[in-house]
Amino acid sequence: MLLASKFWHQGMGYSLRYPSHYITTNILHLEKHSLLGKYVYAMLVFQLSGIVHIVGDVAAGVSVRDSGVMQWFSIQALGFIIEDTFIALYRKITGTKARPDSKIPTWQKIFGFIWVCAWMVWTMPVWTYPISKESDGKGVLPFSFVQYVS
């Protein structure tokens, strides 16, 4: 299991684990707990999730070619790599070890939440821009938080 999985949404991941695990271990013959195996597995989960999500873009009127879904899902594995690298460096520098989920300090949970929000803000436009372009100014959602800020 990836270290980053403590802070990332995994709703679709649970149903896509089995085919990703099968491809990673049975077809590619990668060790389940090796670093390469973990990241190939994560990339496969994201690619399969992208394939599922592209249906939503097509339903919204975005062509498969113009959709940013596959680009967005592809870069998410990079987010795991960045997060895992940061956690490993932090542990090496401070000499701390992994803790059970229930003992993660609150400041680390807050930092993880901020990291995920920042990552999403940076990466989401590649996916959301093509959909919002098709909305004819109506927006993707039936409400807007931005209207209250501006």
Image (cartoon, grey):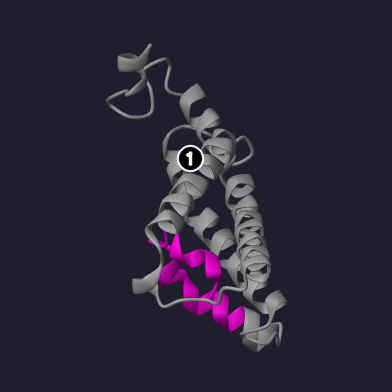
The structure residue drawn at horizontal position 42% and vertical position 22%, both measured from the top left corner, is 135
- Which secondary structure type mostly characterizes the magenta part of the structure? helix
The structure residue drawn at horizontal position 62% and vertical position 34%, both measured from the top left corner, is 66
Q: Position of residue 9 (x, y in %)?
A: 42, 57
Residue 21, by quadrant, is bottom right
Give, as a three-letter code, the residue at label 1: Val
Residue 64, by quadrant, is top right
Q: Position of residue 101 (x, y in %)?
A: 39, 73
Query: Which residue extends farthest front?
Result: 94
Query: Is residue 145 within the magenta segment?
Result: no
Q: Position of residue 7 (x, y in %)?
A: 45, 59
Q: Position of residue 92 (x, y in %)?
A: 67, 70
Which residue is disc 1 drawn over?
A: 58
Q: Which residue is nearer to you in this view: 142 or 102?
A: 102
**What span is colored magenta in the figure?**
1-23
The structure residue drawn at horizontal position 58% and vertical position 37%, both measured from the top left corner, is 122
